[in-house]
Amino acid sequence: MQVYDALIVGGGLAGSLAAIHLAEKGLRVCLFEKEKAPHHKVCGEYLSEEACYYLEEVGFDFDFAQSPLIDDFSFHAPKVSLQQKLQRKARGISRFLLDQFLLDKAESLGVQVLLGERVKAYKREKEYYLIEGKNQKVLAPLLLLATGKHDLPKLHRRVGKERDLVGFKVHMDLTPAHQQKLENSIELFSFEGGYGGLSPIEEGRFNLCFLLEKKKLKDHSLTHSWELLQSYLSERNRVLADRLRMSQKRMDRPVTISGVPYGHMLEPSKVPTGVFLLGDQAAVIPSFTGEGMSIALLSARMATDLIVSHKFSPSASHKYHDYLARILKGRMSLALPIHSLMRGPLASIVGHSIKWVPGVVPFLFEKTRCPEAYYWRTMG
Ligand SMILES: Cc1cc2nc3c(=O)[nH]c(=O)nc-3n(C[C@H](O)[C@H](O)[C@H](O)COP(=O)(O)OP(=O)(O)OC[C@H]3O[C@@H](n4cnc5c(N)ncnc54)[C@H](O)[C@@H]3O)c2cc1C
């Protein structure tokens, strides 16, 4: 039996960033990741300024990774388009590259990274948490759960407000003309039954990521063919049709995710002492109307800072969950209604109204962000 200071389940953004910060403070950390190798994840791959801040802090170099700057935003509903300059510059980068960077960095700092290890459950043994891996049992007084949208199979399932959407992601090459025109833009599209985004990532590629109701997929038999799916989207949004025409898919098939518990929010009083819920395990904010990656990174930074400032005491978990819930509550209550509007028939009407009040878009961007200033203020 191997004893560590902290166990982390999940090697995505939140888990790996937490591992890095704890290892930098000299803690012995063991991280379990169910996948055997780097993989693509369903994500818009749009990183806000604050998300970039947490990554630059641990040495990620956006320019070196050829990650484009994004300073332009457009929204295209079926009958209306609007465009705005972004007040804060964002970045586009693939999760494949980003997650791999963080995991490698954690390993280089001495974290025991166990790949291909799907954790099914954990047990409490006196003052320790115990996880049984394939080949070994490990123990630690601190347990950080960072399994994203997936729950540990043998523990309770989180309840979100909306689970009826399927998420898709595909990397593509646009035509040279579109590539040039959109190299610094994020475009959001709404269409019957869903919405999504198109934005640039490294090496001149673009990421198309969208959500579509399961019912539409079934009714239109869209599950087996990218071509059919592409036609469905093109017929329902003419600007998206223009972007997709002559584009080339850069992945064999889109990656997908379903059953995302949008709207899930942690309940601090229900989390056992010494367990820290990070990232999507703590809250699942609707995609594109909130910043899941920013929350994941902020949660990792906040949890590890509190662990250190509480001299590695498991009791830090209570303060952590209280702080995080306080920061996320307002953001969640704004992101959920915007998400419902985006996927519904009112998207064009809302787009028209917003067009006449240009301050609304920057206001919404500001209110759904998780600025690092909040972090520092909350942490005193
Ligand atoms: C359609 C869509 C679009 C999005 N677009 C954006 C966007 O543009 N910008 C943004 O900021 N956010 C976006 N998000 C949200 C963002 O992707 C997530 O909030 C973020 O990935 C959460 O990070 P995480 O570390 O909590 O989880 P993840 O990054 O999902 O990592 C979880 C890790 O845990 C591993 N794991 C799971 N179960 C187990 C287990 N039992 N044992 C061991 N390992 C396990 C997984 O393999 C994975 O590597 C989007 C989400 C969706 C669905």
Image (cartoon, rainbow, N blue to C red):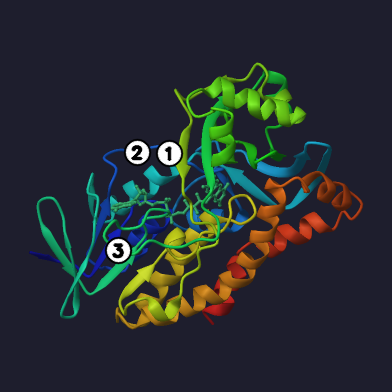
* 347 is higher (above) or lower (below) than 275: above
Between 303 and 224, the residue placed more toward the observer is 224
Q: Is residue 287 left or right of residue 322?
A: right
Q: Is residue 300 left or right of residue 210?
A: left
Residue topped by disc 3: 155
Kindly report the distance in space between the C-alpha atoms of the residues bearing marks 1 and 3. Answer: 28 Å
Q: Is residue 320 left or right of residue 378?
A: left
Mark 3 belongs to which amino acid? Answer: Leu
Between 236 and 25, the residue placed more toward the observer is 236
Residue topped by disc 2: 38
Q: Position of residue 268 (x, y in %)?
A: 44, 78
Q: Nearer the viewer's eye, disc 2 or disc 3?
A: 3
Q: Earlier in the sequence, mark 1 or mark 3?
A: 1
Q: How many marks?
A: 3
Q: Earlier in the sequence, mark 2 or mark 3?
A: 2
Between 159 and 183, the residue placed more toward the observer is 159
Element type at mark 3: loop
Q: Position of residue 106 (x, y in %)?
A: 31, 54
Residue topped by disc 1: 96
Quarter containing the N terminus = bottom left
Residue sitting at 75 percent across and 45 percent down?
A: 345
Q: Nearer the viewer's eye, disc 1 or disc 3?
A: 3
Around disc 2, counting alpha carbons within 10 Å, would you say few (fewer than 14), some (14 to 19), or many (20 or more)?
A: some
Kindly report the distance in space between the C-alpha atoms of the residues bearing marks 2 and 3. Answer: 26 Å
Mark 2 belongs to which amino acid? Answer: Pro
Q: Position of residue 72 (x, y in %)?
A: 74, 43
Asked if disc 2 and disc 3 are in contact, CB closer than 8 Å, the reply is no
Residue sitting at 77 percent across and 61 percent down?
A: 363
